[in-house]
Amino acid sequence: MICNSHTSKNPLALVVDDDFSLRLTMGAALAKVNFDVIEAENGCIALSLFKSKKPDLILLDVVMPEMDGFEVCTAIRELPGGKYPQILIVTGMDDIESTVRAFEVGANDFITKPINWIMLGYRAKYMLRAGQAFRELYLSENRLLKTQKLAKLGNWQIDLVNNAFCCSPEACSLLGLNAMDKPLTFDGFFESIIASDQGMVKETLSNAVKDKEDFSLNYQIIDLNGTQKYILNQGEVFVDENGVPEIMLGVVQDLSQLKQAEERIRFLAFYDGLTGLANRMLFMNRLDMQIENATRNDQKFALLFLDIDQFKRINDNFGHHIGDLLLKAVAETLKSCIRKTDTAARHDKDESGLMIARLGGDEFTILLSDIKNPEHSAIIAQRIFNAIPATWSIEEKDVSVTASIGISVFPDDGSTSETLLKNANSAMYYAKDRGKNTYQFYMESLNRAAVERFSMERDLKKALVRDEFVLYYQPQITFADRKIVGAEALIRWMHPDKGMIPPDKFIPLAEETGLIIDINKWVLKEASRQNDKWTKAGLNSIRVAMNLSGYKLATQDIIQDIKKALETVKFDSKKLELEITENVLMQDDDETMQIFQQIRDMNISIALDDFGTGFSSLSYLTSFPVNTLKIDRSFIMGSIVQRDNRIIIKAIIALGHSLGKTIIAEGIETKEQFDLLKRYGCDQAQGYYFSPPVPVKDFTNFLARGFL
């Protein structure tokens, strides 16, 4: 076969010899029988030509500098496509040892000098024809083997006259037979079949021979690795001219993946594919059965509804892969918390109402049957809180986790599965409103709390349209002269009926609903517009910082939002600072890095808020373009009486200054705290000691004065 790089219809021969005259003579002899010829004076050139030209025939001299013919032959056979060409070793040696070695290294033939040049051409043509036949046979066999392997098929045969048994390599593999240890026999055919199926298989084969009929049977085996497989074995009996059975042919196929797929389909119908817990369908079915059982036996049972707090933020910050691993960890924790004495189980078929289930997302339910009093379910809930660690380490990511649990009790809180589930869900939301990481029982009044939450979500959607948001500003000053150099813009919601709503009440809801993206845009535009007004009024030029929510940062299109805000008011980007929290840095992906780098390229400063309370590391500070570190107020508040706080403050200031960062201490409330931070060399201060966040009018007066 001619390779693509050789365009002639003639076969291609490669002559390798360090003697120019011999190369010329051999080439001429081959050309007379319609070979195209290329030459190489040593082994290295020969290997290079083989890779590029893929010759059909190679004539190799044995004695050559650098590499002899045996070495070249070995190297060619190891190259891609090297098993196909015909190789003729040409040498002046006629000893048996050289001949044997030639065939050992992969030569197809051996010829000694002096050479009969007429016979060389005919010999080459014969070798080429033999080589083509060999290649076609090899490819045909290889295709058959690969086809059987892809289909997980193998064949076997038994001679019923002399009991000789043989099978293909793929069949040996599928049946768990090891042909290397001992010769295969028909009795060995049954060795890998599980004990409970052996009798059935032997009987089926025996009846097939007796009745001279085809057969088809399914059974299980244990292969050499100890793996259980499902096998389909089909065969046919052949008889001689007298009608006596003489040969049985069979085909085996591995059905393990098909069986696994069938079991997987059945599993997914009733169980959660991620955690292995019961799913909503099975849970609701068991809940209905438990209601019937409890009604019949006059029993009480409890339904616990657990939700991971701010799970969306975990997905947004760390990715869905980490979120999935967290869900699996929570499922395992729940199973470890529920004991047999709690009358709750996983998903045993004979226990209708005893299970832990994942309803979907980050929602889990636990059914506690036949409880003596509702207080027992509270003990289980507290046990769960104690078992869930404050921080989970998942693939080197530290993930902070809390959960909220709502509890409904049958029959006090409902007599139908839908009512019990709805009331437990309402109780769970009440637990979240009470500060999360707690449990609450259902009461009728909880419906009002749920309605209130939905009402706030509805009003929040209208707040931007109605222009109900305002910005308050808290001054940032230098320690040296108390000059105002910046301000943090803090959003407030002026609700028409409920008055001022602080951000900690509505920002989490805004992030859950996705409204935070539009709120971010509004804050960007309003803060830039106001600072531009102060500048045009001739007031002190300052930097305005605003908090940037990390909610789905990569999808917020924040760069375009910033550009639009700055272009609208012709605002100097150097006067804008974006504050982010450490959990945003921990997203640690390429998109996040690109966003922050683009922000820095726009000459916008980036401040790391609440520094020291999260899980920052030097790698974040060195790889992310952060300008400013804000020491969290929790360290400042205890700095006067707690020595550890002072040590941490000193370390943060030293670390920040060594990396060229500006250090801001927020939450300063006393003169003692101010003097301490000033003595430690902190750069800027922020806190109620100077001023709380104030409306625009009051902050304008501060700017007119210039210092505090």
Image: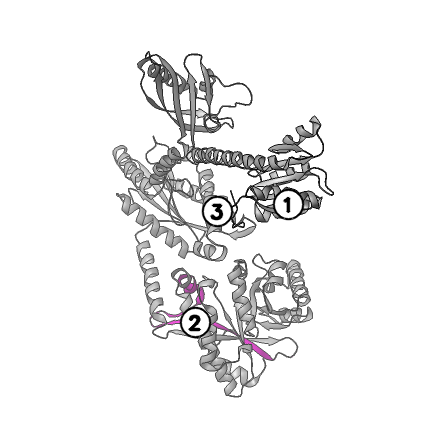
Question: Residue visible at 67% across and 30% down?
Answer: 101
The label number, if any, that marks residue 505 in the structure image: none
- Residue at the disc numbered 2: 521
Type of the residue with mark 2: Lys
Q: Secondary structure at mark 1?
A: helix
Q: Earlier in the sequence, mark 3 or mark 1?
A: 1
Type of the residue with mark 3: Leu
Q: Secondary structure at mark 2?
A: helix
82 vs 317, left or right, is right
Residue 610 image position (x, y, % from top left): 56, 63
Magenta region: which residues?
481-509
How many C-alpha atoms fall within 10 Å of the one at disc 1: few (<14), some, or many (≥20)? some
The label number, if any, that marks residue 47 in the structure image: 1
Say which of marks 2 and 1 sits in front.
Answer: 1
Type of the residue with mark 1: Leu
Residue 100 image position (x, y, % from top left): 66, 28
Q: Quadrant of the C terminus?
A: bottom right
Say which of marks 3 and 1 sits in front.
Answer: 1
- Residue at the disc numbered 3: 325
Residue 347 image position (x, y, % from top left): 37, 35
How many C-alpha atoms fall within 10 Å of the one at disc 2: few (<14), some, or many (≥20)? some
